[in-house]
Image: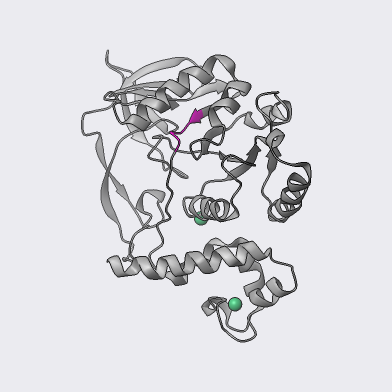
Amino acid sequence: MKKGFIKKQIANQYTVIDDVTQSEIICQARGKFRYMKVNEESQFNKQLTKRTKKETKVLQISPKVGDQVYYDDREDQVLITEILPRKNELIRPDVANIDQVLLVFSAVNPDFSFNLLDKFLIILNQENLTPVLIISKIDLIEETQLDQLKKDMLYYESMGYDVYYVNSKQAIGIDVLAHIFKDKITVLAGQTGVGKSTLLNALMPELGLKTQEISKALGRGKHTTRHTELYEYNQGFIVDTPGFSKIEFKIFHKEDLKSFYPDFVDYSKNCKFKGNCNHIHEPGCMVKQAVEDDEILFSRYENYLKFYKEIETQKDKY
Ligand code: CA
Ligand code: ZN
């Protein structure tokens, strides 16, 4: 059995790059690919909905771009025979094993929102995706406002997130950004209007337009043939997402929210309530103390309270 990774999918046809020869092999997958036995440790078995008991079960999965696979080329028709466990995956675009997600936010038009940033970070954390934060349109914001934004973003940098500031039109900040793609599968994401296409064009003028057409087609929902492709860029791979106007996290119990705040988790280690504190009105809460002492960014906590309420209200729908 030979091993490779899927670079491109058009309907049921997959382009696999062989691990050893680096050559491109066209492979098929059986219509209803295969049933795969997964145990409770498997990424395939992750439960994002209700707190149901994790158990060994049989799931039906299809190969997708980014998958590490085994293939059989002994017959004329080359077949994918096995998909290796994924570290993460997305549905739109249909990609697995993503190394980083470039989250693009504009400084203005639309205005930068810490609420949106925090929401994205929760979702990515939940999906085991690593974000890289890009702030675009820095030429359109007042200098004093930009300074304040950069100051607040230092908090996120101290949490371990990489932050880049770009002005794609004048290609400012692009050269610095260009080095982060090596040996990685990168997904470009952001809301409609943040300058994602302009950034993509600044990074890779030729492919920018091509992926733009695809994502537009995806956005319109008129894309009848399933087509997902990773584009080579600076010794790595990049894929665009259709811009979205609305994002939601899949958290159904408000008590689960806090676990997606790595900065809060650090403080609750020393908390007398341990894992049971929701940092709302528990007396002596270390997280609330850290907010008061300006050790936790106030907007982080403010948004936490908002999301906590959101989850509480959405619960009524079920
Ligand atoms: Ca996680
Ligand atoms: Zn607490």
Q: Is residue 250 above or below residue 301?
A: above
Q: How is the image coloured?
A: one colour
Tell me if residue 71 comes above or below residue 304 in the rendering: above
Which of the 4 quarters of the picture holds residue 103?
A: top right
Q: Is residue 98 left or right of residue 315?
A: right
Q: Main secondary structure of the magenta part?
A: loop
Q: Quadrant of residue 76?
A: top left
Q: Nearer the viewer, residue 68 or 21?
A: 68
Residue at screen point 28% across, 23% down: 225
Query: Residue 214, image x and y in percent?
Result: 40, 23
Q: Quadrant of residue 83?
A: top left
For image coordinates 31% across by 61% down, the residue present is 55
Residue at the far left in the pictured view: 31
Report if residue 86 is visible in the image: yes
Which quadrant: the C terminus?
bottom left
Q: Is residue 78 above or below residue 99?
A: above
Q: Position of residue 181 (x, y in %)?
A: 62, 30
Residue 123 at x, y percent in the picture: 48, 52
Task: Answer with left or right where residue 190 lies relative to residue 164.
Answer: left
In this picture, which residue range is highlighted in magenta? 239-243
Q: Pinpoint residue 149: horizontal percent, then vertical percent.
A: 71, 49
The residue depicted at 46 percent of the width and 44 percent of the height is 88
| Residue 182 horizontal side relative to residue 227, left or right | right
Q: Tell me which image quadrant ligand 2 sits in.
A: bottom right
What residue lies at 66% left-to-right and 65% top-to-bottom? 298
In the picture, which quadrant includes the N terminus? top left
Is residue 280 magenta-colored?
A: no
